[in-house]
Image (cartoon, rainbow, N blue to C red):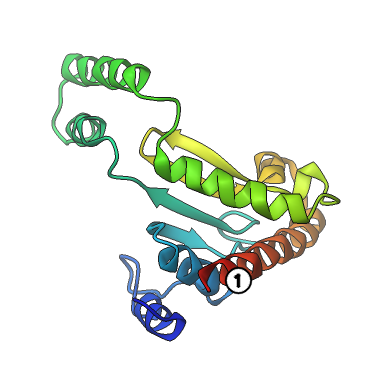
Amino acid sequence: MSTWNDAEAFVRRITDGLGCPIDEGIVETVVAFNLLGLRTCQSCEGHIVDGLPYPWVDFETDEFPAFKQALEEASSDGLSAEAREAQGAQLVALAAALPSRGLLYARLENLLDAYYQQHTATPDEWRLIVRCSSPILFRLMPWCGYQARSWDDKARARNLRRTQAEMRDFTAFLKRSCR
């Protein structure tokens, strides 16, 4: 995928387990990340009714294969309670031995830092952040997303529009970085 058009054509062929394509409002973000060598694994443009009322993009890294293997083993069906507990303890130990962040996480943070150096007036609540789910899974999301469960319908609609605008602005920055 050396050109924007090639990458966009590739991304538009991706579907989820139900056969649904990537949401139109997040396609360019996914294209830009993939062109920058940051492989995405899930994304959503955000929705008022179903799902989360803000856009997000998930990333998975292959940087820590032992952790990934242990996570897969801990998630396997048919484990006894004792085996699941032992696997969980192994995951905690592996995670503690890893660096605080890998290269993918650092690259995402560096992109956000560069973007917000140009957008210093953006209030913290609307800024995009990288949330670490595990040493190998990260989510790009707006900081205010942590409060989304408390939003009423009017706030969900207003905040969805605002967070989508922030993601579009960040995407424009990413697109310039792709060139």
User: Would residue 50 be found to the left or right of residue 89 on screen?
Assistant: right
Specify whether 179 is left or right of 115. left
Asked if residue 10 is positioned above or below residue 74 in the image, the reply reads below
Q: How many labels does the image show?
A: 1
Res 52 → quadrant: bottom right
Query: x and y percent of residue 73 in the render?
Result: 17, 32
Residue 62 percent coordinates (x, y): 28, 44
Q: Residue furthest right?
A: 121
Q: Nearer the viewer, residue 170 or 179?
A: 179
| Above or below, comparing residue 142 to residue 55 in the picture | above
Q: Looking at the image, which residue is at 28% across and 14% down?
A: 89
- Residue type, mark 1 in image: Arg
User: What residue is drawn where x is 77% and y is 61%?
Assistant: 162
Circle 1 SS class: helix
The N terminus: image quadrant:
bottom left
The image position of residue 35, as x and y in percent, is 43, 68
Residue under label 1, please give it. Answer: 176
Determine crowd level at label 1: few under 14, some 14-19, many 20+ residues with C-alpha closer than 10 A. few
Task: Please provide percent x and percent y for residue 161.
Answer: 75, 65
Q: Nearer the viewer, residue 116 or 55?
A: 116
Residue with the most extreme front position: 179
Q: Does 177 sit above or below residue 124?
A: below
